[in-house]
Image (tube, rainbow, N blue to C red):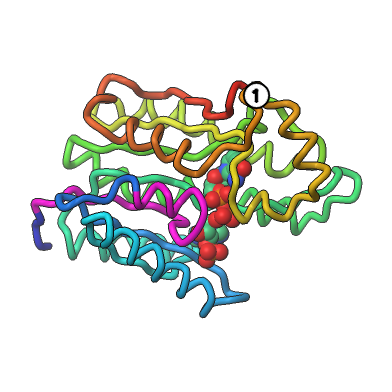
Amino acid sequence: MTETSKRIVVVTGGSRGIGRSICISMAGADTHIYFNYFNPVNPDEEAEKAKETENAIVDAGGSATSVSVDVVSEPAVNAFIDKIMEEAGRIDVLVNNAGITRDGLLVRMKTADWDAVLDTNLKGSFLCTKAVAKFMMKQRYGRIVNIASVVGASGNAGQANYSASKAGVIGFTKSVAKELASRGVTVNAVAPGFIETDMTAVLPEKAKEALIQQIPMGRIGKPEDVAAAIKFLASDDASYITGQVIHVNGGMY
Ligand code: NAP
């Protein structure tokens, strides 16, 4: 195991959207960022997007390594984390950001769509957190930030699977925070509202307009709005905050 003096940050789903923004906001000369992505349908396109994130991190003065790793696969997640420990000797920050939607009304929802969303959003967070927790506990230091969603607190018609996964992420965050607090590891969640990324780009214009009506600040959030809260929770300024959910939603809920 080699030791590095750099702060080691791991971000899941860093190739696009909020994950990319998190990577860029945390980039710096004293930080190395490992991020993953996974899309077996368009592997070349996603690898290209991951390269773009890597380049943006370098432009921001930092360094990065990206790998295609499915957060749903326990062996793949463990190999990813073990490799980082082998290379860097420590992990300071984990951001569980990878997530998907498979929207539909309950009565029409396919079991496969329920499973895919719960697996990626909730089981993926469990697997990655479990893999890093043992190392963070030994280090007696760590920052874990899980990405939930406003609908995990409010519910949303057409998103029973997604809302359940994000409510699960909130319960998971609060429980693991209690388990790891005495070891210097904080565990918090950020619950974004309606943020401009590929995930929301697929919504029809009318649905977007209706959503904006529900936002007191009158605009869709930017990935940077979410990344700023994550950067704070991952910093030493947040060392006495654990088991909390910060809502970044323009006053929506
Ligand atoms: P996005 O643009 O669709 O990006 C999703 C990221 O997750 C991509 O990097 C994707 O990799 C990765 N990913 C998906 N499945 C994966 C898997 N099995 N293993 C590893 N990586 C995987 O989504 P986003 O809008 O940035 O959302 C990021 C997080 O914020 C999610 O947890 C989402 O639920 C949450 N969130 C988003 C909003 C919003 O309005 N956008 C609101 C609330 C919460 P590829 O590039 O390889 O596909």
Name which residue lies at 91% across and 45% down: 107
Q: Which residue is mark 1?
A: 252
Q: Where is residue 95 shown, x and y percent of the image? A: 39, 45
Q: Is residue 12 magenta?
A: yes
* Front one among 32 and 201: 201
Q: Where is residue 48 shown, x and y percent of the image? A: 46, 74
- Which residue is at the far front? 218
* Front one among 71 and 67: 67
Name which residue lies at 83% across and 43% down: 206
137 relative to 127 in the view: left or right: left
On screen, residue 179 above or below 21? above
At label 1, the amino acid type is Met
Q: In the image, which residues are magenta?
A: 5-24
226 relative to 133 in the view: left or right: right
221 relative to 126 in the view: left or right: right
Residue 138, quarter of picture? top left
Name which residue lies at 82% across and 55% down: 110
Name which residue lies at 21% across and 58% down: 85
Quadrant in which the N terminus is drawn: bottom left
